[in-house]
Image (cartoon, helix red, strand yellow):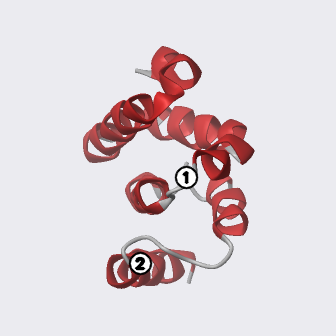
Amino acid sequence: QRKDTLDQMVKTLEVTKGKIDVPYEIIEELVGCVTEYPVESITILDKIARSEGESHEISYKKEEYRQIIRLTKETKNTEATKIADDLINHLGSRGFIDDFRDLL
């Protein structure tokens, strides 16, 4: 059930190019999913982060971003870790390097 929901969210974000109405609610939900579904969870976070034009939207949920990235990397899943590292680099390029560098 949960995996199906995450898979559907990935597909939706692909169609909408990462744009959704209330990304902060999704981000909060990912914290509880990431350990069991690291690839899907970090993929969703990555798509949301790359779509958010305003930096304040990332700043607003920075601690959740950090937690999801950290938990993803703790799973030692190779695919998920690569997505997480790419996301950290993307966030760094958007001016958040000091907030995420320690997670690389």
Spatial distance from mark 2 to mark 1, Cα to Cα?
13 Å
Q: Residues within 10 Å of mark 1 (few under 14, many from 20)?
A: many
Which quarter of the picture shows residue 67?
A: top right
* Residue farthest to the front, as pictured: 54
Residue type at the position of mark 1: Val
Residue 88: x and y in percent read 41, 33
Q: Nearer the viewer, residue 35 or 84?
A: 84
Residue visible at 71% across and 36% down? 63
Indicate left or right for 32 with 72 as reference.
Answer: right
Say what secondary structure mark 1 lies in. loop
Residue visible at 65% across and 67% down? 26
Residue 99: x and y in percent read 58, 23
Q: Earlier in the sequence, mark 2 or mark 1?
A: 2
Which quarter of the picture shows residue 17?
A: bottom left
Residue labelled with disc 1: 34
58 above or below 69? below
Residue 16: x and y in percent read 40, 82
Residue visible at 40% across and 20% down? 104
Q: Disc number at residue 7? A: 2
Residue type at the position of mark 2: Asp
Residue visible at 56% across and 84% down? 1
Q: Nearer the viewer, residue 8 or 58?
A: 58
Q: Nearer the viewer, residue 53 or 46?
A: 53
Say what secondary structure mark 2 lies in. helix
